Image (cartoon, rainbow, N blue to C red):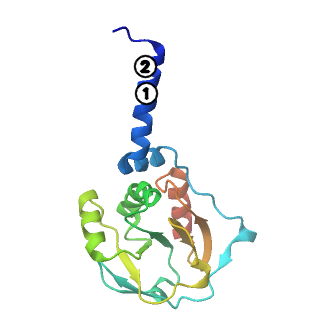
Amino acid sequence: MKITKKSISNILFVIAIGLLLHPTSKAWILRQISFSPSIENKVDQVQLKSYNWSLKGLNTKDYDFNQAKNKVVIVNFWATWCVPCVAEMPSLQALYDDYGDKVEFLLVTSDSNKKVAPFMKERNFNMPIYNQASNAPDEFFTKTIPKTFLVSKDGKIIIDTGRANWNTKKIRSLLDSLLKE
């Protein structure tokens, strides 16, 4: 049997479709095409009006968002079944590894610990995961996930975005400057 350009093309097409249909492959592809999130213009930055928000720790202790006042905070809304969420998790973990003692990381999900614990263990993630125990501040309202907010020490939302690559020089530089303020 002679292999033609057309048969090679067809084989590659079938492989590509197969990869796109497999959830693990989807996450990998999304990771490859993720960009660093955009920083809000100063005039567009929203100020948090309230820090009244309670979180129930799934793999950590419960958290009162009032503790986040005067701190740099990353709030990420996600789910184990969300492919774009899964795609950005390694970049968040890399940031957490380096900034976890300086920045408050709040990864919030509606999934149960029964789903979250094996997900985290399988991927060697150790970021703090929470369920909401009360409603989030209005400024964090979202209908889609993933949704991530970077909040400055003075309570301004510097980044408000969907899926992104968080482990970039741009974000690390921004975090370093926000921590110095």
> In this orientation, does residue 180 appear?
no
**Disc sitting over residue 171 in the figure:** none
Q: Could you give the CA–CA distance between mark 2 and mark 1, rounded to whole angstroms?
A: 6 Å
Is residue 155 positioned above or below 23 on the image?
A: below
Q: Type of residue at label 1?
A: Leu
The answer to whether 16 is drawn above or below residue 160 in the figure is above
Amino acid identity at mark 2: Ile
Evaluate if marks 2 and 1 touch, with contact meaning CB atoms under 8 Å apart. yes
- Within 10 Å of disc 1 (Cα), the crowding (few <14, some 14-19, many 20+) is few
Q: Give the SS element for disc 1.
A: helix
Residue 71 in the image: state x and y as whole percent: 50, 78
Q: In this orientation, does residue 1 appear?
A: yes
Task: Name the image quarter holding residue 154.
Answer: bottom right
Q: Is residue 117 left or right of residue 109?
A: left
Count of picture labels = 2
Query: How crowded is the residue under tag 2: few (<14 C-alpha within 10 Å), some, or many (20+)?
Result: few
| Above-or-below relation of 176 to 29 | below
Provide the residue designation for mark 2: 8
x, y percent for residue 168:
50, 51
Q: Quadrant of the N terminus?
A: top left
Picture coordinates of residue 83, whole percent (x, y): 43, 57
Q: Farthest residue in the top direction? A: 2
Going 45% across and 25% down the picture, which residue do you hit?
10
> Could you tell me which residue is drawn at 60 percent across and 67 percent down?
160
- Nearest the viewer among 133 and 10 is 10
Residue at x 52%, y 84% (from the top left corner): 136
Element marked by disc 2: helix
Residue 12 marker: 1
